Image (tube, rainbow, N blue to C red):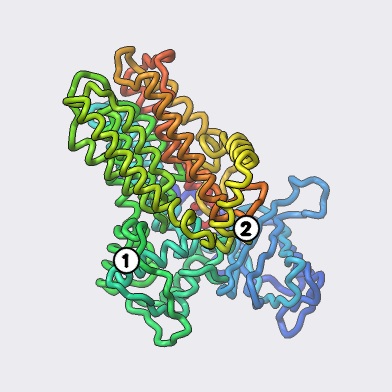
């Protein structure tokens, strides 16, 4: 009741100070000055690129600007609020108005008091028709904004309850409550549009997974569906809906043209790139939810969002088990799992969620076996962490070196030296088997192709280049690691970036929180921890994994012989960073805060970081 009341109150206050109108305020011709446009039968027709329309009216609060347009392509206009001709930049506000190819109207969130707005066309747009320009100050009650305020209020209640009842709110329960709530909010507010990296590829694999498992060599794709599973103008990541009205318009388009049983008989849309691969099973939770939506004949956009929900449920369940199991570093894992990048990945179509979640689970079950506490090796823990690292490496085998951390298990935990050696041999065999799925093919096939998106790529040719110039490649690799170390481990690209959505790239709060929670994780001098040798070994395997990540992208995504490595992104570091943070915990700094205060502060800062990311990237730009 408290959460709903706060959300309703926030919506009421948001709409209270605005001069409300019953309908749109359409501007008269006398209020519009055209530069590069000519007026023809009530329509402004551009005569050249870079044309603009200057809207002048009585000073008032403008909630939204609305205009209808006709243009062959994606109209990337610029909206200036205020007088941008003045040298004082504070006199105006610039808004990038990127319109989707399927749109015929634009609704721009202004939210500013002004008497002048300019709509500037790009220089490349020479034939644009604009009509029906209006100010929209009608009632603006938004479900997305309401739910966000409810989420914030709910987290405040959680913090209050945590402060007074910390025995119940353990780190894994805190993670589960916040991740599910924030994840559901994002699923409901994100458009059925490509927002995550390569999301169109992952959506296609999830949507047609059961066709793949059935052994179909090709699948028949509806022409409109083809826009969602390939890089298309209708699904272009730079044309994400920028207002609630635009998002609803796009949803209506998908629902009107696609249904739960959409199919096409034309051979023009036959896809043969959904063959069974090692990574295919990573899409099973997403595919199951999609099938559930199709079974109940839901609207297509609801089915699309259900698939994202499948990924979120997998992430929440696996990471919950990981935080509950891990013997130390629970606060660190909770914070890392709640970073904007991690949660955003969990609510989009991707197999990165499988990599991150199962790596966390593998680490959690491995750490108890690394402790030299006189106990015997747990077969259950060994089976779980080996399977977890294998599952995490199926989509991306480059992460399999993390499994080698198991070689650091003390010999005292084994019944005999022979059992210890057999275990190490088994771990090595699993490592080599998984590594072969990544390295064996380019070694045997010198003509293996790379990713065409990277340019003149060729895995076999690039591998021969590395063998011919090993010293120069090592130099390139080390310089790349040094250049991107901070941004890919503690910076925005690693912890704060949310796919193609806008964000605060100067964000350092994630780095401060991550470093702070790591330095203050030790509470007692005799608390369980890794030995110095084990910490050094873990950091070494982290380094090897990172080198493999860069090498894999150099082989597949970088032109042959290039002096730069392309395609590496900060989100790839997340599983490695988790193990690295556990390895650098120190007893030199001890945390004397009472547990309830410490956990409340850490939770508050972690939730604030996530809420800030969701608000700035999703809610503010749309609702």
Distance (Cα) linking label 1 and label 2: 40 Å
- Per the image, the residue denoted by label 1 is 290
Residue 262 pos. (x, y %): 37, 79
Where residue 459 appears, as percent x and y from the top left, is 54, 56
Which callout, 1 or 2, points to the residue nearer the camera?
Answer: 1
Q: Which residue is drawn at 71% across and 81% down?
A: 42
Q: Is residue 219 visible?
A: yes
Q: In what element is the residue under mark 2?
A: strand
Which residue lies under the disc numbered 2? 62
Is residue 165 at all visible to an observer of this figure? Answer: no
Callout 1 crowding tier (Cα within 10 Å): few <14, some 14–19, many ≥20: many
Q: In which quarter of the image is residue 421?
A: top left
Instruction: Determine the residue positioned at 80% across, 74% down.
Output: 48
Which is nearer the N-term, disc 1 or disc 2? 2
**Residue 16 in the figure: left or right of residue 506:** left
Circle 1: element type: helix
Q: On screen, 277 above or below 475?
A: below
Label count reads 2
* Residue under the point 59% across and 47% down: 466
Marker disc for residue 612: none
Of 369 and 473, nearer the camera is 473
């Amino acid at each position: 009741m408290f959460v709903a009341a706060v959300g309703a109150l926030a919506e009421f206050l948001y709409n209270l100070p605005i001069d409300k109108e019953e309908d749109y305020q359409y501007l008269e011709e006398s209020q519009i000055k055209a530069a590069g446009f000519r007026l023809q039968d009530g329509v402004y027709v551009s005569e050249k690129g870079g044309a603009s329309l200057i809207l002048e009216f009585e000073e008032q609060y403008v909630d939204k600007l609305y205009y209808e347009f006709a243009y062959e392509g994606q109209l990337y206009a610029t909206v200036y609020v205020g007088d941008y001709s003045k040298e004082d930049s504070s006199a105006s506000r610039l808004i990038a108005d990127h319109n989707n190819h399927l749109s015929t109207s634009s609704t721009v969130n202004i939210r500013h008091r002004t008497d002048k707005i300019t709509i500037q066309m790009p220089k490349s747009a020479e034939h644009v028709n604009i009509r029906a320009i209006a100010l929209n100050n009608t009632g603006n009650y938004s479900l997305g904004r309401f739910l966000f305020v409810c989420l914030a209020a709910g987290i405040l209640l959680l913090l209050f309850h945590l402060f007074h009842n910390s025995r119940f709110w353990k780190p894994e329960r805190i993670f589960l409550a916040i991740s599910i709530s924030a994840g559901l909010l994002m699923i409901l507010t994100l458009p059925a549009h490509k927002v995550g990296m390569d999301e169109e590829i992952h959506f296609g694999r999830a949507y047609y997974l059961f066709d793949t498992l059935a052994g179909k060599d090709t699948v028949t794709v509806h022409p409109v569906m083809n826009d969602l599973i390939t890089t298309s103008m209708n699904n272009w990541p730079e044309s994400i809906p920028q207002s609630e009205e635009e998002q609803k318009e796009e949803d209506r388009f998908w629902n009107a043209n696609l249904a739960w049983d959409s199919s096409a008989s034309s051979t023009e849309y036959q896809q043969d790139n959904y063959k069974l691969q090692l990574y295919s099973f990573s899409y099973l939770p997403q595919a199951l939810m999609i099938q559930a939506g199709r079974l109940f004949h839901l609207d297509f956009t609801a089915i699309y969002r259900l698939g994202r929900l499948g990924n979120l449920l997998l992430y929440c369940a696996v990471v919950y088990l990981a935080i509950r199991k891990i013997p130390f570093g629970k606060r660190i894992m909770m914070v890392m799992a709640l970073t904007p990048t991690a949660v955003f990945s969990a609510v989009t179509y991707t197999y990165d969620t499988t990599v991150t979640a199962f790596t966390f689970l593998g680490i959690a079950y491995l750490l108890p076996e690394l402790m030299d506490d006189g106990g015997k090796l747990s077969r259950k823990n060994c089976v779980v962490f080996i399977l977890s690292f294998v599952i995490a490496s199926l989509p991306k085998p480059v992460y399999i070196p993390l499994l080698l951390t198991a070689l650091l298990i003390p010999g005292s935990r084994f019944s005999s030296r022979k059992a210890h050696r057999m275990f190490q041999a088994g771990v090595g065999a699993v490592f080599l088997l998984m590594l072969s799925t990544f390295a064996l093919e380019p070694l045997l096939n010198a003509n293996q192709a790379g990713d065409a998106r990277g340019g003149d790529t060729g895995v076999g040719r690039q591998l021969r280049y590395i063998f011919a110039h090993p010293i120069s490649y090592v130099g390139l690799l080390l310089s790349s690691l040094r250049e991107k170390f901070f941004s890919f481990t503690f910076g925005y690209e690693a912890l704060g970036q949310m796919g193609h959505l806008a964000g605060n790239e100067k964000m350092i709060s994630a780095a401060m929180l991550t470093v702070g929670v790591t330095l203050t994780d030790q509470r007692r001098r005799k608390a369980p921890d890794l030995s110095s040798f084990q910490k050094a070994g873990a950091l070494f395997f982290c380094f090897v994994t990172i080198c493999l990540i860069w090498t894999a992208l150099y082989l597949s995504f970088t032109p042959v012989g290039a002096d730069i490595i392309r395609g590496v992104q900060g989100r790839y570091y997340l599983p490695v960073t988790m193990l690295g943070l556990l390895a650098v915990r120190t007893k030199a700094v001890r945390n004397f805060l009472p547990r309830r205060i410490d956990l409340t502060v850490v939770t508050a800062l972690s939730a604030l970081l996530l809420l800030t990311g969701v608000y700035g990237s999703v809610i503010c730009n749309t609702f």
